[in-house]
Amino acid sequence: MNLATTIHMLQGRGFRMTTVRRFLLQTFKDTKAPLSANDLIGILKKAHLECNRTTVYRELTFLVEQTLLRAVDFGDGAKRYELAGGEHHHHFICSNCKAVSDVNLKNDLEQQERILEKILGATIESHSLEFFGICKNCGTK
């Protein structure tokens, strides 16, 4: 993501570029792992940016609606977010240390989706596939 291009695009759509919005976009650009609202609140606090919880949730909703972020569900009840776009990928989450790694599958899941559509007589719009286990750092301790 090019931050200047993204800011220009949002401003071109008539949206204000607040300090918090700019900071969140920069944070997602600089961070590899998906972040929760609580993660972002902590990051904002460390950066000495005062922002209430409601504003963070509103900004996340706005950035998802603008297709700049996508929600990621690790099955623990905490919704996380990462930059949208780029290559479709999945995640490996360590059950012990909670480290997150991107996983790119060699097999094309699109073909499997088409097979499932035929079997189910349905249209698949998206899928979510995450892997959970113990990372090599935690497994060697």
Image (tube, grey):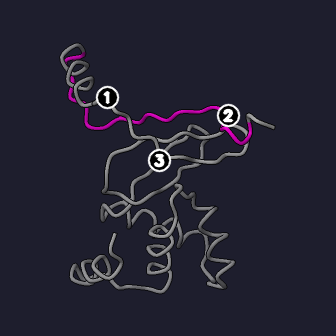
- Furthest residue in direction right, as rendered: 141
**Residue under circle 1?**
107
Please give left or right for residue 1 compared with residue 81 in the image: left
Q: Nearer the viewer, residue 76 or 135?
A: 135
Residue drawn at 60 percent across, 43 percent down: 77
Whether 119 is drawn above or below 66: the answer is above
Q: Is residue 52 above or below residue 75?
A: below
Q: Amino acid at mark 2?
A: Ile
Q: Nearer the viewer, mark 2 or mark 3?
A: 2
Task: From the top left corner, tell me how far across and down residue 132 is, in percent.
Answer: 59, 33
* Magenta stretch in the rendered image: 120-138
**Residue at point 39% right, 43% down?**
89
Could you give the CA–CA distance between mark 1 and mark 3, rounded to whole angstroms? 21 Å
Q: Residue at x 24, y 78 (%)?
A: 9
Q: Amino acid at mark 3?
A: Val
The disc label shown at residue 72, or none? 3
Do the CB atoms of the residues marked 2 and 3 lie less than 8 Å apart? Answer: no
Where is the C terminus found, in terms of image quarters? Answer: top right
Mark 2 is surrounded, within 10 Å at the Cα level, by few (under 14), some (14 to 19) or many (20 or more) other residues, namely: some
Q: Quadrant of the N terminus?
A: bottom left
- Which label sits on residue 134? 2
Q: Amino acid at mark 1?
A: Asn
- Rounded to the nearest whole Å, what is the CA distance between mark 2 and mark 3? 20 Å
Q: Secondary structure at mark 2?
A: loop
Quadrant of res 70? bottom left
Q: Nearer the viewer, mark 1 or mark 3?
A: 1
Please report whichever mark, 1 or 3, sits nearer to the chain's N-terminal start. Answer: 3
Q: In the image, is 7 to the left or to the right of 95?
A: left
Secondary element at tag 1: loop
Q: Residue furthest front?
A: 140
Numbered-mark total: 3
Is 59 covered by the magenta stretch?
Answer: no
